[in-house]
Amino acid sequence: MPLNDNDLDKFTFLKVDLLRKVIAVCIFTTYHKIRYMEVAIHESWKPFLREEFSKTYFESLAQFVKEEYSHYTCYPKGNQIFAAFNHSSFEETKVVIIGQDPYHGPDQANGLCFSVKDGMPHPPSLKNIFKEIEDDLGIPYPKSGNLERWADQGILLLNATLTVRAREAGSHQKIGWETFTDVVIKLLSEEKKGLVFLLWGGYAQKKIPLINGEKHHILTSGHPSPLSANRGLWFGNKHFSKTNKLLRNQGSDTIDW
């Protein structure tokens, strides 16, 4: 049976209405993905960080990161931006190591500070970390520089800036990441007790005012980079044995470094 003019008008209206709904869903989905950067964050962190994700600065940060990853090579991979949180849940976190920003070389960064992917050469700072562990605890220098094995034991390997453009160190600094990670540090300080914070170098030590030193343990030393280590500011700090002693004294499991 052929359609009359009224039927055609109704059909056209339904198509337009459906199209509007589809567009609205697409806009909402795109907005949601931009806000959350399409990264799954461990459930344990969501109650504490959900409000932060809705703030204007974080929405601007998410938009910036989305555009950067669309137009440039950036590190780490999108699904590893929040790897530190995914490997060390809020409840399990007992040690915090603070870095600056991810490695900017090809395929180095895996979302954990100082860590590189399996099979990648060890950067100078990581080499010095492993050398200090060897001297401190007698643990042989490892083959892999992937520190996921640390993170899975409750070490939050947190860079202050979680992303970087390839071959441009510090390129994503001062666009909102530091605000977010400062909130994380303050959150841990306020909500937990007995954490061990390892603050290596001047940049990390600027975070000391965010930490309640009466509730937590703060160990400081020079940075493990050759520039600092070769001046006697890194080797011999024994942070790894000291961390285990502090954990043991409060009844927590020690770290298998």
Image: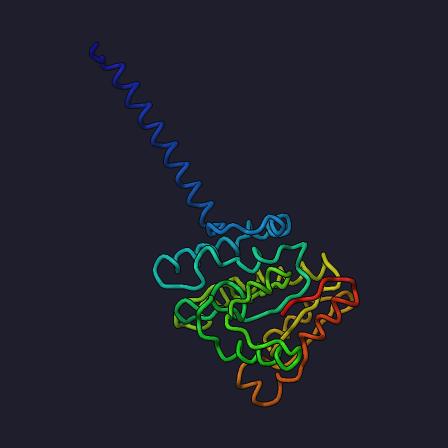
Nearer to us in this view, 64 or 169: 169
Residue at 53% x, 65% y is 112
- Is 111 left or right of 1, judged from the image as shown? right
Residue at 46% x, 50% y is 38
Q: Quadrant of residue 210?
A: bottom right
- Is 175 left or right of 232, judged from the image as shown? left
Q: Quadrant of residue 65?
A: bottom left
Residue 8 position, x and y percent, is: 25, 18
Nearer to us in this view, 46 or 198: 198
Observer able to see residue 51: no
Q: Which image quadrant: the N terminus?
A: top left
Observer able to see residue 147: yes
Q: Quadrant of residue 31?
A: top left
Q: Where is 257 relative to 78, above or below?
A: below
- Is 186 left or right of 32, judged from the image as shown? right
Colour scheme in the image?
Answer: rainbow
